[in-house]
Each structure stands twice: as structure tokens, then as C-alpha cells.
Image (tube, rainbow, N blue to C red):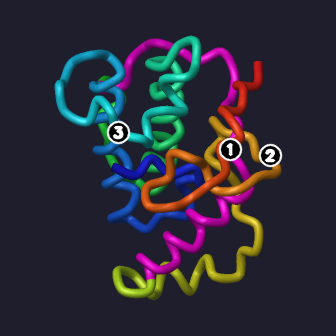
Amino acid sequence: MRLWSLHPKYLDPMGLVTLWREGLLAQAVLEGKTKGYVHHPQLHRFRDQSNPVGFIADYLRVIHAEAAGRGYRFAATKISRSRADGQIAVTRGQLDFEWQHLSKKLETRDPKWLAGIRHILIPEPHPLFYAVPGCIAEWEKGCPAPRDGMLPARV
């Protein structure tokens, strides 16, 4: 499961469709509707919020809007009606890590898409997140990071 902190506009078509599916799975986990993925590290930043389902629903709404803008027909009715009450901090180190990770994926999966975004030096976060200074998130799979503690939601 990869719940990108990057704005979904940077994702190629396959990446956007995959993010939609994984976001819906994350929503089901946070709603207690599935027994799989309940301990997935990518869910920590949502679980640590006062309204995890509201935050993942707002996350999905942005993905849906990006997809609609590209002419895709994702089912908005699958998104919870719950709403978040702010934003979640994401470190610049995490955004940089994800940018490099996405670039590597696109080198083989969709080089043409990569060529269209390669000029971007400082990628924007998904609108649910706001960037703060810091290293890679401690929940990032396979990446050692200092234990700085969780960053608060912006209200």
C-alpha cells in the first residue's frame, strides 16, 4: 500500500488508479470493515488524527477530483461522508523521498510521463498535507529515520 503524500497530479494513469484503489482499501481498514492491513505503517498518520475516516475521505476526494479532471469515472459514492477538520503535517524529507521513489517507478513504467514532470524541483504535497522541515517519516517502509514523534494536524 502506498498512500502518496505527493499531489496526485504527479501520478501517471496507472499510479492514479492504483492510489484510488489503495485509498479505498485504507478507508475500509480505518472503518473497521476489513481484517487485512490493519497494522500497515502507511495508516499511522491517519490513525493518529481525531477523525481518521474523515481524513482518509478528504484524501480520497482530492484523488477523485484529479481523476475527474482527467476524464476518469471513479465512483465518488465509495468515499465516506465523514470530513476532516484540518491538515496533516508531512516532512519535506518524506516528500523528497516519495518524489525519488515515484521517479524511479516512472523510469520503467511510464518514461513519457516522467519526462513531463522531471522539471519539477519542489513537488507539492497532496492538499490534505502541509510540508514542514524534517527527515523521512518513521513509518516509511525500509527507511531508517530519527524518532522525532508524530507531527500534529493543522486545524
What amino acid is at disc 1?
Answer: Val
From the image, tell me which residue sits under label 3: 40
Q: Secondary structure at mark 3?
A: loop
Q: Quadrant of residue 95?
A: bottom right
- The answer to whether the residues at label 1 and label 2 have Cβ atoms under 8 Å apart is yes
- Read off the residue under disc 1: 90
Residue 94 belongs to the span the image colors magenta = yes
Q: Residue at x 51, y 34 (%)?
A: 59
**Residue 27 on image: x %, y %:** 35, 27
- Judging depth in this view, the residue of 64 and 141 nearest the camera is 141
The location of residue 153, given as percent across then percent down, is 70, 25
Disc 3 residue crowd, few under 14, some 14–19, many 20+, Cα 10 Å: some
Task: Judge whether 46 appears above or below 132 on screen.
Answer: above
Give x and y (percent) for residue 103: 52, 77
Residue for badge 2: 132
> CA separation, marks 3 and 2?
23 Å
Mark 2 neighbour class, 10 Å CA radius: few under 14, some 14 to 19, many 20 or more = some
Mark 1 and mark 2 lie on one chain; the one further toward the N terminus is 1
Label 3 close to label 1 by CB (< 8 Å): no
Residue type at numbered disc 2: Val
Picture coordinates of residue 45, whole percent (x, y):
54, 33
Q: Which residues are magenta?
A: 78-106
> Residue at (33%, 65%) from the top-left corner?
14
Indicate left or right for 145 with 33 as reference: right
Considering only vertical position in the picture, is 86 above or below 105? above
The quadrant of the rendering that contains the C terminus is: top right
